[in-house]
Image (tube, helix red, strand yellow):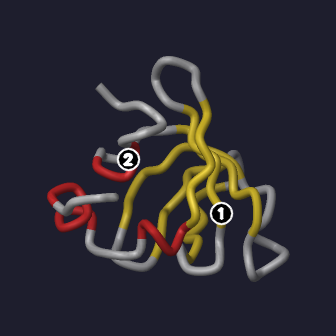
């Protein structure tokens, strides 16, 4: 079960997300649902289409299935999703 403590080891696609902070001021405040993830970006489906947001220098607020929210520094997500899921997180 996904929780704030283990969110980094789970699949992010399908979660609702808000970009809390970003190096590009135009990306801050973008919200929607994660539709894809690459090594360096999250693709977010917004009401105006898809936005590709760089993970580095961004902070994301994810809403988990149980309704809890968790803020995640994008640099901690910056690896291939399949590798991040299997790696140890301290």
Rendering coords of residue 82 (x, y %): 18, 63
Q: Which mark is residue 83?
A: none
Q: Measuring 58% from the left and 64% from the top, which residue is drawn there?
A: 73
Residue 35 on image: x %, y %: 42, 51
Side of 74 relative to 57 (left or right): left
Cβ atoms at labels 2 and 1 below 8 Å apart: no
Q: Residues within 10 Å of mark 2 (few under 14, many from 20)?
A: some
- Location of residue 61 with respect to 49 vertically, above or below: above
What is the number of callouts on the image?
A: 2
Position of residue 30 in the picture relative to residue 56 (left or right): right
Where residue 59 is drawn, which disc sits there? 1
Q: Nearer the viewer, residue 33 or 9?
A: 9
SS type, badge 2: loop
Residue in the image at 46% along x and 23% along y = 65
Figure check: 41 above or below 59:
below
Residue pictured at 54% horizontal, 43% vertical: 33
Is 48 left or right of 84, judged from the image as shown? right
Residue at the limit of the structure toward the front, as seen here: 90
Q: Which image quarter: residue 63?
A: top right
- Check the picture and name the quadrant holding the C terminus: bottom left
Task: Pick whichever of labels 2 and 1 is earlier in the sequence.
Answer: 2
What distance separates the C-alpha of mark 2 from that of mark 1? 16 Å
Numbered tag placed on residue 13 in the rendering: 2
Quadrant of image for the N terminus: top left
Residue 70 drawn at (x, y percent): 59, 41
Residue ranking furthest to the right: 25
Q: Nearer the viewer, residue 67 or 76?
A: 76
Mark 1 packing: few (<14 Cα in 10 Å), some, or many (20+)? many
Q: Secondary structure at mark 1?
A: strand
Kindly identify the residue that appears in the image at 57 percent across and 42 percent down.
62
In screen coordinates, is 47 left or right of 64? right
């Amino acid at each position: 079960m996904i929780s704030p403590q283990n969110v980094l080891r789970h699949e992010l696609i399908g979660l609702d997300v808000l970009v809390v902070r970003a190096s590009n001021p135009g990306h801050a405040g973008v919200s929607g649902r994660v539709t894809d993830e690459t090594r360096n970006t999250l693709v977010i489906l917004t009401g105006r289409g898809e936005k590709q947001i760089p993970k580095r220098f961004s902070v994301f607020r994810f809403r988990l299935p149980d309704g809890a929210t968790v803020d995640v520094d994008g640099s901690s997500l910056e690896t291939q999703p399949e590798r991040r899921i299997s790696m140890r997180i301290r």
